[in-house]
Image (tube, rainbow, N blue to C red):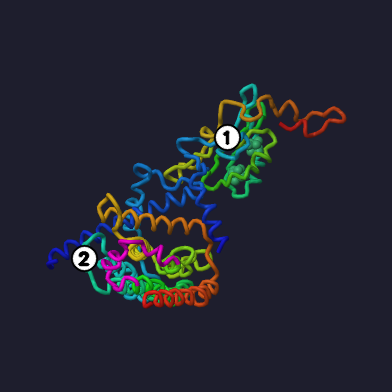
């Protein structure tokens, strides 16, 4: 693609993602409502659909002041860092056959790296806030990211081994016969669990668990800075859903409908799964969370990789 | 592991369960007559003001939001010249209603008191006094007050 086309496509993609994240917050609130025998927001617009617009306007007009004693530059930088890498990570996602802004050879690695970068935003924001709760949240975020990023990468290595490529398009193309979720069920489950943690979603949102840390690393944030963290989190859900679809659910492959439609539908379905998990599962204790990652998930991911490697080579 | 899947399943089923939400402004809630909402001053069966300006309600009020100023008629009967309740402070505890010897002050099941200015939450006597008898239709304080009750009467029977 030529330079201008890439810039145009990126702008369209970013705008689309912002809207998608907004709509996703509405979908989440409504679905959570129904899962809890409530209605959820249903006042603004038809079925409350414009709720996310109202929320955005509200957040934009709210006061957004750094707390006293805060490191103002870092405090301002952190929210931007939370959203930007995730948006960049979408650059390598293949939405359809040949439909990617930057079809990198190392696409999967790039996307997971961008996911991992968000932890800097959390830690930086926590540190800059000069708040005990925020700092505790930041510490948790760092430890959790290390623990879960390790087996996030390993759980998808099986797929990479079978497809023989890190490029998203190649991985999807390798699933023409069977989706990798059938070939790599253990890898898929582990990847899903790790992606919950990578997107800081309940039940793995200990860095902001409001029951014991007020709001964790976000305690001091309000207005648009808060919105950026929020945006980062919701776009991250979409990114890990897109990764899950690409790696395990056959990407854009599907009968009758055009590829991008299939891709969108699958990403939506996986994102709904995230909401469902949020509604059903309680938050684990912090030591349980870390112990699960290092003592159970990581060995399982290694075992999966070992078996896959053995099968591929043999 | 099994427990996790079970709870996922159970919560997933809730998607098809009826919701408990009441669509409030359209669907009004059914409130009991004893619900503690907006306060009124009621009248006797013969149309007289029940309140005798004894100030008991103002004394018992935990947030001090009632102001009563006494006046006297030519026959020597007391009545409130001013009766003012600040609903911005009232906590709707209902103690004033319990303290009132004449059943004049009563809480009603109307809770839609929201307003744009605090000053409009101060209700004066014309805002409080209603034309009817409120919750105790037949009750007239002077029929039971200052009289010797027949022997073996349960004092509760004398209450409104
Ligand atoms: S309900 Fe309670 S707070 Fe309100 S006026 Fe009566 S005594 Fe005072
Ligand atoms: S409302 Fe009842 S308690 Fe209050 S001053 Fe009047 S008679 Fe006394």
Query: For this rendering, which residue is in front, A108 or A66?
Result: A108
Residue farthest to the right, as pictured: B151
- Is residue A309 shown left or right of residue B33? left
The residue lying at 82 percent from left, 29 percent from top is B149
Disc 2: residue Cβ within 8 A of ligand 1's nearest atom? no
Instruction: State the residue at coordinates (36%, 45%).
Output: A44
Q: CA distance from mark 2 to mark 1?
A: 69 Å
Q: Residue at x 53, y 59 (%)?
A: B5
Q: How many marks?
A: 2
For disc 2, the neighbor class at 10 Å (few under 14, some 14 to 19, many from 20) is some
Labelled pair 2, 1 in contact (Cβ < 8 Å): no
Label drawn at residue A307: none
Within the magenta stretch, is there residue A233?
Answer: no
Quarter where residue A230 is shown:
bottom left
For the point 58% across and 42% down, the residue is B67
In the rendered image, residue A183 lying in the magenta stretch gets the answer yes
Q: Which residues are magenta?
A: A162-185
**Which residue has dot 1 on it?**
B40
**A207, A253: nearer the viewer:** A253
Q: Nearer the viewer, mark 2 or mark 1?
A: 2
Q: Is residue A119 above or below residue A57?
A: below
Q: Which residue is mark 2?
A: A101
Residue A131 position, x and y percent, is 45, 73
In the rendered image, is residue B4 in sight?
A: yes
Chain to which mark 2 belongs: A
Give the quarter of the image for residue A171.
bottom left
Q: Where is ligand 2, by quadrant? A: top right
Q: Is residue A30 above or below residue B25?
A: below
Task: Tell me the crowding category of disc 1: few under 14, some 14 to 19, or many 20 or more residues within 10 angstroms, Cα based.
Answer: many
Measuring from the top left, give residue A18's x and y in whole percent.
29, 58
Circle 2 SS class: loop
């Amino acid at each position: 693609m030529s330079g201008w086309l890439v810039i145009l496509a990126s702008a369209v993609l970013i705008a689309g993602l912002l809207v998608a994240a907004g709509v996703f917050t509405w979908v989440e609130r409504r679905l959570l409502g129904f899962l809890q025998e409530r209605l959820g927001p249903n006042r603004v617009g038809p079925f409350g659909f414009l709720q996310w617009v109202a929320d955005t306007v509200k957040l934009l007009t709210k006061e957004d002041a750094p707390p006293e004693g805060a490191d103002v530059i870092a405090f301002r930088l952190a929210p931007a860092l939370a959203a930007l890498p995730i948006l960049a990570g979408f650059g390598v996602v293949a939405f359809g056959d040949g439909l990617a802004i930057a079809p990198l050879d190392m696409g999967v690695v790039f996307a997971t790296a961008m996911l991992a970068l968000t932890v800097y935003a959390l830690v930086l924001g926590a540190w800059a806030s000069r708040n005990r709760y925020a700092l505790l949240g930041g510490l948790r975020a760092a430890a959790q990211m290390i623990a879960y990023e390790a087996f996030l990468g390993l759980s998808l290595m099986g797929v990479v081994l079978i497809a023989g490529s890190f490029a998203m398009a190649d991985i999807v193309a390798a699933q023409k016969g069977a989706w990798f979720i059938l070939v790599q069920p253990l890898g898929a489950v582990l990847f899903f669990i790790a992606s919950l943690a990578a997107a800081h979603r309940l039940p793995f949102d200990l860095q902001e668990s409001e029951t014991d840390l007020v709001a964790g690393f976000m305690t001091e944030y309000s207005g648009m800075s808060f919105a950026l963290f929020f945006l980062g989190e919701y776009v991250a859900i979409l990114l890990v859903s897109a990764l899950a679809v690409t790696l395990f659910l056959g990407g854009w492959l599907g009968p009758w409908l055009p590829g991008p439609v299939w891709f969108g539908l699958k990403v939506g379905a996986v994102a709904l799964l995230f909401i469902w998990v949020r509604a059903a599962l309680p938050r684990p204790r912090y030591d349980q969370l870390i112990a699960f990652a290092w003592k159970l998930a990581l060995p399982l991911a290694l075992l999966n990789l070992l078996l896959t490697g053995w099968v591929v080579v043999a | 592991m099994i427990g996790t899947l079970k709870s996922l399943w159970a919560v997933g089923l809730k998607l098809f369960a009826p919701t408990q939400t009441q669509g409030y402004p359209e669907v009004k809630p059914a409130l009991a007559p004893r619900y503690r909402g907006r306060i009124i001053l009621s009248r006797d069966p013969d149309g007289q003001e029940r309140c005798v300006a004894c100030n008991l309600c103002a004394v018992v009020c935990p947030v001090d939001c009632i102001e009563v100023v006494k006046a006297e008629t030519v026959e020597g009967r007391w009545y409130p010249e001013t009766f003012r309740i600040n609903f911005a402070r009232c906590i709707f505890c209902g103690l004033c209603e319990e303290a009132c010897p004449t059943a004049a002050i009563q809480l009603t099941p109307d809770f839609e008191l929201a307003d744009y200015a605090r000053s409009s939450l101060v209700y004066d006597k014309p805002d409080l006094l209603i034309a009817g008898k409120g919750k105790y239709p037949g009750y007239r304080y002077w029929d039971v007050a200052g009289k010797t009750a027949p022997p073996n009467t349960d004092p509760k029977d004398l209450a409104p």
